[in-house]
Image (cartoon, rainbow, N blue to C red):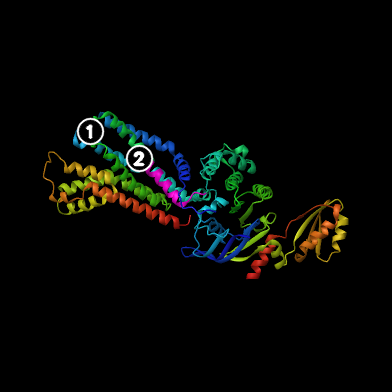
Amino acid sequence: MEIVEFYEVTKKYGRVEALRNASFKIPGKSVTALLGPNGAGKTTSMKLIMGFSKPTRGKVLVWGLEPWRREDLRIRLGYLPERPIYPLDAVVEDLLFHLAKLRGLGKSEVERVIKLTGLGDYRESKIGSLSRGYMQRLGIAQSLLGEPELLVLDEPTANLDPAARREVLELLKTLHKELNVSMIISSHIIPELQEIANYAVFIDRGVILDYGSLEDLWRKYRVEPLFIIETLDPGRVAKQLVEKPFVNAIRKLSPSKLEVLIDPENYKTFEKTVSELGELVLNYEFKSANLGDLYEKITRGRS
Amino acid sequence: MRRSHVVGVKRIYVFSSIVISKRLLAFLVVASLLNLGLIYMILFSKISIPDLSIESIFVLVVGLYRILMLNYATTVAREVKSGEIQLYLAHTLRRLEYVVTTLIAIDLLPLVILLTPYLAFLGVIEPGLILRGETINLVPLLLVDFTICASIYTLVASRGRDTLLVVIGVVMALLSILITPLSISMVAYGRDISLTIGYLGSLITSILAPYAYSVAYNLYAHLPYPYQPLNPVFSTLPSPTIMSIISLTTSIFVLVATILWFKRRDV
């Protein structure tokens, strides 16, 4: 079932069209990457999902309801704004407690999100004293209050240094695994969400370029999916895999790791083949193909 | 999910406490200083002299409170301007509740604080004055005065116009302290153009500064020994009671317009 649906949505700010006839759908239990350069219309889309803005034309539905009209929908949503908009002189724990109270929740919920986001050491710090990385953790913590069914995260890694960006992405991955919550994450850094997303919406200058599950998009645009295989005997695994017609390339990353590029249409067959290798394979991970390559192919296809 | 149009009283209470806790110390320090001055004047001035009545003292204080009310109005305006409002709306606060909370922070808190020395005053005056209602009529007038001011501030704050708000705040204070008494005196004793300007000014200030209008009007209307006869046109000025009702109606209209507009605006 779709959780978010856009039907020919146009959003104008004065004479500027931030979104133009945008139509796409996002299924439940997915981690969706909303990807596009700066000014593409990502924040506008997120504000429409949250019901902060009203579409100029068209219809936005979240769980089949219009968020603009149904303010009660927001109890099921968690939101991380693009810019840190928190009162800087407030204390971390106090702000979270105030926001929890708005949702009718108590201290225990604040404790839960502080623990989940690793803010324990900073609970009594003033928000203004936090580093940007921890400010984002606070943003994610407040978005988790009330165990929302859908997290709408607007550029969670924007303006972070590489280490902090890595930390935030790891945190999001962990949260998705532990809470099994649907997420929509926007980013203008196209490849960074490839480890976490399984669905994508590509947007540029207010126009939806394409959307769908990454598996379908790899196939559609013939971008080679990439697997990392961990094994005690890379030589033997490589020998067995190289014979398969859908394996395009194999590269040794380390004494125990192989990178395997496969034909996009044989994703499932490949997974079956790997599982048939039994104990020879310690672990395997779908790294996905490069989202950047996919984006490039999609934009090239449009132009 | 059950659709509910009911305003969340609990959410308004919680959010009011969040808003009020911001800059509370600064607000209380200024309000306390003002109130101490007010208490001093009430207790030690000769309030029997007509032009230094308790009502006249309150005209000055109300004017200063109009500036003090900017404290929370500008806080809200900055919240709207910076996008901080999204944080609260994302946590289930509804737009209507946001406007109501804004009004509470701008209007009710200062009113309650201002009325504290007034209540102290009631404790020391002759009980007969209270029983005759000669002093208690101040309360509804103050409520009307604060409400028109707060409704205008709420309208501007909800648009995120913090600089404009400060300008309007200063104008509202001047209306109360200076322009209203001046306009009424021009109606009472002015000639030709000054009379016309004074009359127009009185009509405007009677709505925008109903408390000051009421005090100034009553001061001239009940002067025991006017040093010169009042202009006959003075008697055609609308009564303060009627203008207070019009002022309150205007406040309600401004608030309804603010709510309707705010429910449609992007945040």
Which chain is mark 1 on?
B
Q: Which residue is mark 1?
A: B129
Residue B221 lies in what quarter of the image?
top left
Q: Residue at x 22, y 46 (%)?
A: B182
Secondary element at tag 1: helix
Percent x, y of residue B82: 48, 50
Q: Position of residue B53 (x, y in %)?
A: 22, 36
Q: Nearer the viewer, residue A286 or A252?
A: A286
Binning the other alpha carbons within 10 Å of mark 2 as few (below 14), some (14 to 19) or many (20 upward) gives many
Q: Which residue is mark 2?
A: B111
Q: Residues within 10 Å of mark 1 (few under 14, many from 20)?
A: few
User: Majority secondary structure of the magenta segment?
Assistant: helix
- What span is colored magenta in the figure? B92-108
Secondary structure of the residue carrying tag 2 is helix
Q: Is residue A12 above or below residue B83?
A: below
Give the CA separation, mark 2 to mark 1: 22 Å
Measured as percent of width and height from the top left, residue B63 is found at 30, 42
User: Could you tell which of marks 2 and 1 lies nearer the N-terminus?
Assistant: 2
Q: Are marks 2 and 1 on the same chain?
A: yes
- Report the side of B256 relative to B125 (left or right): right
Question: Is A183 within the magenta?
Answer: no
* Residue A270 vertical position relative to residue B32 in the rendered view, above or below: below
Residue type at tag 1: Leu
In what quadrant of the picture does the N terminus of chain B appear? bottom right
Is the residue B216 above or below the residue A182 in the image?
above
